[in-house]
């Protein structure tokens, strides 16, 4: 097969996607790599040639890569993930609106085109988590405890574009990151970027059935096939605080091989024929520690997905 990877400079030497590209080439597939921030493209011809079985995006949220992927999709190419799904999760303000529409548990979200507008958020909503709507990899995420702290941050926030603010979800100081790849779910625990004082070693952990079902719903709502979900377990249960297309897949066993196989499956059959949560339940994969047997968990996830699509 012939594949095209759109790769941002910051990921040029990153394991994702470098190891995936190497694996695909080792299997005999042709992989072309376009540096979306450093390549000249003929938008009137080259994207319409139909030379690739699929296009894959690994770029920062604010870069030009998504536009190029959307152009490839307009030309009829298969994209990994679906270009529309990527747009829905990369714009965090839009992602919050989509989540609210479908009843996903997310914090109340305020959006402001100018930082000074955040001062209108009621004091009862504090502490707040403030971040750029197009942020990624934890960039410029800030925990703001009081309106006074927000006022002091306004000059710093001025260059961040559209901002979102959400009430802080009280938690243990650790994040649960769940990855979806090839129809399977893997959970990892890691230190929260808001709590650098908590020394938590990143590790795979068992995936509770409730959270597995929630992550399956997230994939179905946004239309994603390869993705990661950040979940906090707050006083009222699990809360989705971020969704990422093509994440790092850290701690996933044979991550490069699994992602490469998923890309090939999507390229061969299109988005509706390979591994999408829309067509079959995701299978939670236990960490090495003891965890509940898979059949009951898979059945619960299947029931949730079936209910979401009904």
Image (cartoon, rainbow, N blue to C red):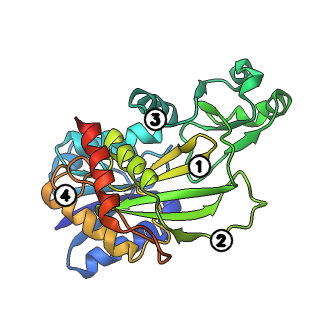
Q: Is residue 128 left or right of residue 274?
A: right
Residue at point 44%, 33% (across, down): 99
Going 29% across and 61% down the picture, which residue do you hit? 183
Location of residue 58 (image quadrant): bottom left
**First of labels 4, 1 by sequence position:** 1
Residue wearing tag 4: 274
Between the residue at mark 4 and the residue at mark 3, the CA separation in whole angstroms equals 24 Å
Residue 15 x %, y % = 46, 72
Q: Which marked residue is nearer to the observer: mark 3 or mark 2?
A: 2
Q: Quadrant of residue 21?
A: bottom left
On the image, numbered disc 3 is attached to which residue?
A: 95
Give the secondary structure at mark 4.
loop
Tell me, yes or no, whether the two marked residues, 4 and 3, touch with CB atoms within 8 Å: no
The quadrant of the image that shows the N terminus is: bottom left
Q: In 3D space, how far apart are the residues under numbered discs 4 and 1 (Cα atoms)?
A: 31 Å
16 in relation to 94, above or below: below
In the displayed orientation, state which residue is furthest to the top.
Answer: 120
Residue 100 lies, in percent from the top left, at 45, 29
Residue 38 falls left or right of residue 107:
left
Q: Which mark's residue is nearer the viewer, 1 or 2?
A: 1
Tag 4 near tag 1, CB within 8 Å = no
**Residue corresponding to mark 1:** 233
Looking at the rendered image, the disc whose residue lies closer to the viewer, 4 or 2, is: 2
- Which marked residue is nearer to the observer: mark 4 or mark 1? 1
> Is 236 in front, or is 14?
236
């Amino acid at each position: 097969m012939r594949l095209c990877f759109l790769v941002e400079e910051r990921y040029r030497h990153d394991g994702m996607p470098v190891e995936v590209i190497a694996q695909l080439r080792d299997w005999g597939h042709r992989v072309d790599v376009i540096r979306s921030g450093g390549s000249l493209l003929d938008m009137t011809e080259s994207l319409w040639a139909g030379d690739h079985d699929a296009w894959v995006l690994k770029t920062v949220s604010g870069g030009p890569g998504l536009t190029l992927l959307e152009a490839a999709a307009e030309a009829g190419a298969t994209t990994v993930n679906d270009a529309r799904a990527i747009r829905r999760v990369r714009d965090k303000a839009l992602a919050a609106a989509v989540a609210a529409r479908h009843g996903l548990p997310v914090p109340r979200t305020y959006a402001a085109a100018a930082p000074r507008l955040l001062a209108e958020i009621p004091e009862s909503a504090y502490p707040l988590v403030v971040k750029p709507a197009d942020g990624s990899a934890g960039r410029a995420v800030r925990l703001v405890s009081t309106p006074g702290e927000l006022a002091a941050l306004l000059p710093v926030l001025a260059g961040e574009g559209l901002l979102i603010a959400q009430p802080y979800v009280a938690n243990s100081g650790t994040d649960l990151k769940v990855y979806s790849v090839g129809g399977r779910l893997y959970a990892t625990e890691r230190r929260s970027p808001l709590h650098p004082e908590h020394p938590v070693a990143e590790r795979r952990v068992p995936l509770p059935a409730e959270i597995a079902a929630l992550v399956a719903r997230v994939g179905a709502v946004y239309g994603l096939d390869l993705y990661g979900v950040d979940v906090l377990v707050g006083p009222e249960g699990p809360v989705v605080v971020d969704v990422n297309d093509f994440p790092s897949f850290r701690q996933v066993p044979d991550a490069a091989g699994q992602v490469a196989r998923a890309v090939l499956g999507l390229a061969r059959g299109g988005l509706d024929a390979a591994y999408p949560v829309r067509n079959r339940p995701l299978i939670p994969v236990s960490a090495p520690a003891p965890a509940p047997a898979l059949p009951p968990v898979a059945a619960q996830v299947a029931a949730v997905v079936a209910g979401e699509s009904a």
